[in-house]
Amino acid sequence: MGICFQFLTILAGIFFLQSVIALAGGSGCLKCHEPHYEDKGTCVNCHKGNPRTDRVSIAHHNLILARYADFTMERSPVVKRGRKLIETFGCRRCHVTGAKGNRLAANLDRVLVVARPQKLFNAIKTPVLFMPNFCFKETHIIELVNAILAQAARTEPEAGEIPLVIHFEDEKQDEESVFVKRCGSCHTALTARFGGLGKGNIGPNLSSLFSEYYPKTYGNKDQWSSEPLKKWLKNPREVRKSAQMAPVKLTPDEFSRLLEALL
């Protein structure tokens, strides 16, 4: 009996040691994959997954593909380029990322909890209604995804998520909206008060135009506000000689209602 108990104890110890090694991302992954970036840590540090099994479907559950794993490495040039894209194209005008931005659309700091990297890639490649289509190359989308994941991984989540306001289409409101009537054929905008406005894709998306996160396109360097907008609408080519937009004549009341929609 004593010998049998000792044998079972030794066997249990072996299984425990194997589990520890597997949990460290060692033998389980390396049975099929060549090691790389060994100085960065274990396989699961970058790719997640489950190294405790030989069953591929289980081992690869929630696996992060190699092209999305740069976010786990400090000072990654891929992440650096992605962060520059976030700033250049004004992603924070609608999204929160890195604990900064507006809450007109999904909070990207929660993406590690609610979505897989490939789903985020698809959302950028094929944008939903009212999201700008920047026509990014796939390499740029991969950089963006890595930058978003990096900021999500390093941002302390809030105690609770503030729910987004869901707006249903209101035909009567569209009929009365100055934005829809005077701007909506060329522009779209996601707004806090009225939801999505406009159906045009000729001009730029005007979501959060007056926000600090909107690209500083007025005069190529300044932030938009009511006075620059008034000057732009009066004669765009006075601001930018190469402007393709025609002047838009608005009454004072129409301009006030336009500001109300864009604020």
Image (tube, grey):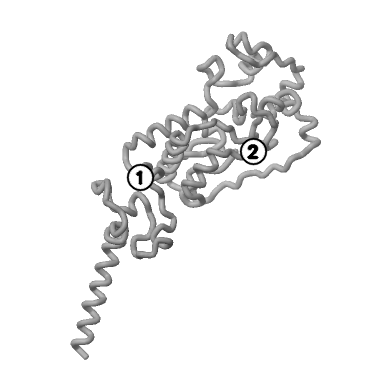
**Residue 73 x, y percent position in the rendering:** 33, 42
Q: Which residue corresponds to mark 2?
A: 129
> Which is more toward the observer, 182 or 127?
127
Q: Amino acid at mark 1?
A: Thr
Residue carrying label 1: 72
Q: Is residue 196 above or below residue 257?
A: below
Q: Is residue 172 visible?
A: yes
At 43% from the left and 46% from the top, the residue drawn is: 156
Residue 210 position (above or below residue 11): above
Give residue 201's position: percent from left, percent from top: 64, 28
Q: Is the residue marked by circle 1 packed among few (<14), some (14-19), or many (20+) residues within 10 Å?
A: some
Q: Residues within 10 Å of mark 2 (few under 14, many from 20)?
A: few
The kind of secondary structure element at disc 2 is loop
Query: Which quarter shows the C terminus?
Result: top right
Q: Quadrant of residue 226?
A: top right
The type of residue carrying mark 2 is: Leu
